[in-house]
């Protein structure tokens, strides 16, 4: 009989997204939050491995993610505020 073998289910691998989620493209605050989460993930992975080369690379990557998040936060603070909504006639 041709059914789904148990081995077929175990062979599937989860794949990382290849595109940036829409929320991160539209909201800069979400971008810096995402970068900080990635930095935390790298630090966790570094602490869980016994290979010193991998630890060093992961800690370096975490530092790079933090630097990108800080730069994003600085850019967000310098950006002018955008007003959404209708403009009132009395504001002329």
Image (spheres, rainbow, N blue to C red):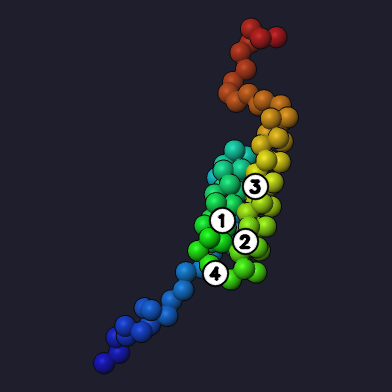
Q: Give coordinates of residue 57: x percent, y percent.
A: 66, 63
Q: Are marks 3 and 2 in contact (CB under 8 Å)?
A: no
Which secondary structure lies at badge 4? Answer: loop
Which secondary structure lies at badge 1? Answer: helix
Q: Residue at x 66, y 9 (%)?
A: 91
Q: Are marks 1 and 4 in contact (CB under 8 Å)?
A: no
Q: Earlier in the sequence, mark 2 or mark 4?
A: 4
CA distance for labels 1 and 4: 13 Å
CA distance for labels 2 and 4: 12 Å
Q: Are marks 2 and 4 in contact (CB under 8 Å)?
A: no
Which secondary structure lies at badge 2? Answer: helix
Q: Earlier in the sequence, mark 1 or mark 3?
A: 1
Q: In the picture provided, is 68 more to the left or to the right than 33?
A: right
Mark 1 or mark 3, which is nearer to you? Answer: 1
Identify the residue under disc 4.
50
CA distance for labels 1 and 3: 11 Å
CA distance for labels 1 and 2: 6 Å
Which secondary structure lies at badge 3? Answer: helix
Identify the residue under disc 3.
66
CA distance for labels 3 and 4: 23 Å
Identify the residue under disc 1.
43
Q: How many marks?
A: 4
Q: Are marks 1 and 2 in contact (CB under 8 Å)?
A: yes
Q: Residue at x 67, y 40 (%)?
A: 70
Mark 3 or mark 4, which is nearer to you? Answer: 4
Q: Residues within 10 Å of mark 3 (few under 14, many from 20)?
A: many
Q: Is residue 27 above or below residue 38?
A: above
């Amino acid at each position: 009989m041709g059914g789904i073998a148990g081995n077929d289910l175990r062979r599937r691998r989860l794949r990382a997204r290849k595109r940036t989620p829409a929320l991160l493209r539209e909201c800069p605050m979400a971008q810096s939050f995402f970068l900080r989460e990635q930095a935390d993930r790298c630090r966790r992975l570094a602490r869980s491995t016994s290979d010193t080369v991998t630890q060093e690379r992961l800690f370096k990557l975490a530092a790079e993610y933090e630097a990108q998040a800080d730069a994003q936060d600085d850019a967000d603070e310098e950006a002018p505020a955008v007003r959404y909504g209708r403009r009132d006639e009395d504001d002329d």
